[in-house]
């Protein structure tokens, strides 16, 4: 097998792993009512089917990226696929909710390994200047997983019961392992293994901090008790302070000074957080917006939301391709302008806005979001020593999850502020379009902050090298 074919096998394997890991969330979401009915669970209880997966995934991503710097990354990726596929198979046999949650935790571990390691695999086989398109294809796989999970889950449930939804992943995992093993098993570790390099205490502290933060954001979103919310915020702040204290005493910390000294990494990481907060916050509200204001059916709502997801997925590889020729920074700036304009226009819609007009706005936001991701990740990784690529890429994946959660919290709070009484999305929602405008303006403000962030001047050498 020649070098070009070997690269393509690695790229295809990494993309399939990312597709499978991200597809799972929307795939399982469709089955939640069926699982709740089977186990006699409440909505609150069944929500942990999603939360346990996301919490495990987000909290372990950085650690998995660090492990890819210390252990053979190809073997770690294959291990992640095996864990994920096996846990999915066992989850389909769960006799009760407790067992299903346990297997969801295992799925989160496998997904963290796949998502944390896949960007590094690409950077190992593609040199700088050629990574834009491969990273764009990886972003497309990420977006495609989210896009196709829900309709695929609905199709499966039309003919079979909920356990069949969990059998989709093993069907994909088997060819991933078979096709990818030949190439991935050849990758060697960047440096010899030792426990100090892993930073076990830093990983545990980081996991605890992220879990507390996500739980706190979830509590705020659901309008929890003010006293308990403040206590949760204080606890999260204390956990973050403990994390900084632990990391300052580690010889090889996860939050390495080498990354924090690089402007491209800092700006790119903040950009990921803001981009996902703006777009995913608005995306969360679209089913309520389309159903309550425009009376779309569930099927029609799904088609409209697919416009945003599909435009994102289609344009992602082109964003990477353009970045290789025009420079990362130029493409990122263009993408942030498109997202900002799309959200501003969405905040100015009226009940008379046509279906084609709404679809055009969703496509504009999706195009900007798709253009942003590969060039921004390329800028984050550009110039980093190979030993830090896994850590930087996995940090980027964590920030996507945190940005999405932050966006949901901000837009729901803005929605509530848009009317005089507290709003519950479960009971009637917003009576008119004005409170949705508040929420979309909030998302636009976040997008505007991302635009301003990426307009900051950069050292001349950064602009020159990113354009090469």
Image (cartoon, helix red, strand yellow):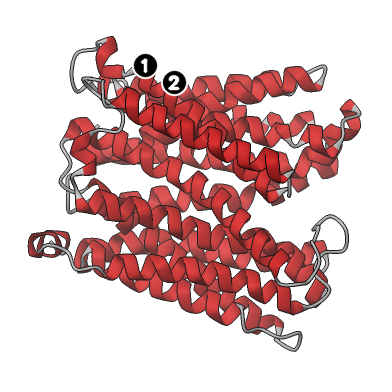
Does the image show residue 161?
no
SS category of the residue bearing label 1: helix
Where's residue 395, x and y in %?
A: 37, 39
**Residue 205 appears left or right of 285:** left
Marks 1/2 in contact by CB < 8 Å: the verdict is yes
Where's residue 205, x and y in %?
A: 43, 24
Instruction: Identify the residue at horizontal 61%, vertical 23% (top origin).
Output: 105
**Residue 297 appears left or right of 278:** right
State which quarter of the image contains the C terminus: bottom left
Image height of 54 relative to 283, above or below: above
The residue nearer to you, when weighing 178 against 158, is 158
Residue hosting label 1: 200
Where's residue 119, x and y in %?
A: 34, 40
Numbered tag placed on residue 1 in the rendering: none
Image height of 78 relative to 455, above or below: above
**Residue 288 appears left or right of 461:** right
Does the image show residue 28?
yes
Residue hosting label 2: 204
Badge 2, how many Cα within 10 Å: few under 14, some, many 20+? some
Residue 304 appears in which quarter of the rendering? bottom right
Instruction: Identify the residue at horizontal 84%, vertical 40% (top origin).
Output: 33
The residue nearer to you, when weighing 178 against 348, is 348
State the CA–CA distance, disc 1 to disc 2: 6 Å
Where's residue 284, x and y in %?
A: 65, 58
Q: Residue furthest top?
A: 194
SS category of the residue bearing label 2: helix
């Amino acid at each position: 097998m020649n070098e070009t074919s070997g690269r393509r096998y690695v790229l295809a394997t990494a993309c399939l792993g990312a597709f499978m890991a991200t597809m799972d969330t929307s795939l399982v979401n469709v089955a939640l009512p069926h699982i709740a009915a089977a186990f006699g669970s409440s909505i609150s209880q069944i929500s942990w089917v999603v939360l346990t997966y996301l919490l495990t995934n987000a909290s372990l991503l950085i650690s998995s990226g660090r492990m890819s710097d210390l252990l053979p990354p190809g073997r770690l990726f294959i291990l992640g696929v095996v864990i994920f596929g096996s846990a999915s198979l066992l989850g389909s046999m769960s006799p009760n909710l407790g067992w299903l949650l346990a297997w969801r935790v295992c799925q989160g571990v496998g997904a963290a390994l796949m998502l944390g390691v896949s960007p590094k695999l690409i950077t190992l086989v593609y040199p700088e200047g050629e990574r834009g398109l491969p990273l764009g294809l990886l972003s497309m796989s990420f977006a495609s997983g989210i896009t196709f999970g829900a309709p695929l889950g609905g199709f499966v449930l039309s003919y079979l019961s909920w356990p069949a939804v969990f059998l989709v992943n093993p069907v994909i995992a088997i060819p991933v392992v078979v096709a990818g093993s030949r190439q991935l098993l050849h990758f060697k570790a960047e440096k010899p293994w030792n426990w100090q390099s892993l930073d076990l205490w830093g990983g545990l502290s980081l996991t605890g901090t992220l879990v507390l933060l996500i739980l706190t954001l979830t509590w705020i979103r659901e309008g929890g008790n003010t006293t308990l919310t403040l206590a949760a915020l204080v606890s999260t702040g204390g956990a973050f302070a403990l994390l900084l204290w632990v990391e300052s005493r580690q010889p090889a910390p996860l939050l390495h000074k080498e990354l924090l000294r690089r402007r491209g990494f800092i700006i790119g990481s903040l950009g990921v957080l803001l981009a996902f907060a703006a777009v995913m916050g608005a995306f969360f509200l679209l089913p309520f917006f389309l159903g309550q204001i425009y009376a779309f059916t569930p099927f029609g709502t799904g088609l409209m939301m697919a416009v945003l997801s599909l435009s994102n997925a289609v344009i992602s590889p082109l964003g990477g391709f353009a970045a290789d020729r025009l420079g990362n920074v130029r493409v990122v700036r263009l993408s942030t302008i498109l997202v900002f304009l799309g959200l501003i226009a969405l905040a100015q819609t009226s009940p008379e806005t046509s279906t084609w007009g709404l679809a055009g706005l969703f496509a504009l936001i999706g195009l900007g979001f798709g253009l942003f991701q590969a060039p921004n990740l390329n800028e984050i990784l550009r110039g980093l020593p190979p030993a830090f690529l896994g850590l930087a890429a996995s940090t980027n994946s964590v920030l996507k999850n945190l940005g999405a959660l932050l966006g949901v919290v901000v837009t729901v709070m803005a929605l509530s502020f848009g009317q005089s009484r507290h709003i519950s999305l479960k009971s009637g929602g917003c009576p008119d379009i004005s409170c949705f405008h508040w929420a979309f303006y909030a998302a636009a403000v976040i997008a505007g902050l991302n635009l301003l962030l990426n307009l900051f001047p950069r050292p001349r050498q950064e602009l020159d090298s990113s354009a090469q």
